[in-house]
């Protein structure tokens, strides 16, 4: 069971570092340049899958991911989860 203990991140970092890591990850993902690039790439993929490949389900999910990236930062900021 030593490998299970290694998989627990709280065994090798403090709870404050763990919380800071996730806050930094989500603020980086939902705010700034990376969120715009990911949202743009998901919009391009939505167009590609929906129109060119005629796979409307994949196009919808790519569009949903782009919408989540575009508006997720505002929603998480409104909820007080992002700095």
Image (cartoon, rainbow, N blue to C red):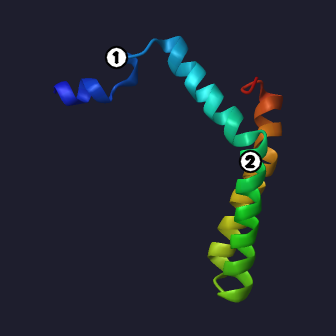
* Quarter of the image with the C terminus in it: top right
Indicate the quadrant where residue 5 lies. top left
Classify 12 as above or below 78.
above
Instruction: Identify the secondary structure beneath mark 2.
Output: helix
Residue 33 at what x, y percent from top left?
Answer: 77, 45
Instruction: Identify the secondary structure beneath mark 1.
Output: helix
- Look at 83% across and 30% down and name the residue there: 78
- Look at 72% across and 26% down and name the residue there: 81
* Quarter of the image with the N terminus in it: top left
**Of callouts 1 and 2, which one flags the residue occurring earlier in the amino acid sequence?**
1
Could you tell me how many numbered marks the image carries? 2
Indicate the quadrant where residue 73 lies. top right
| Residue position for label 2 | 35
**Callout 2 crowding tier (Cα within 10 Å): few <14, some 14–19, many ≥20:** many
Q: Are marks 1 and 2 in contact (CB under 8 Å)?
A: no
**Quick one: 53 or 64, which is closer to the camera?**
53
- Look at 77% across and 39% down and name the residue there: 31
| Residue position for label 1 | 11
């Amino acid at each position: 069971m030593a490998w299970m203990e290694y998989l627990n991140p709280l065994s090798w970092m403090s709870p404050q570092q763990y919380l800071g890591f996730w806050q930094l990850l989500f603020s980086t993902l939902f705010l700034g340049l990376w969120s715009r690039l990911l949202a743009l790439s998901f919009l391009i993929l939505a167009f590609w899958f929906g129109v060119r490949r005629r796979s409307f389900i994949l196009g919808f999910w790519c569009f949903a991911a782009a919408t989540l990236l575009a508006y997720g930062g505002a929603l998480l900021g409104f909820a007080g989860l992002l700095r």
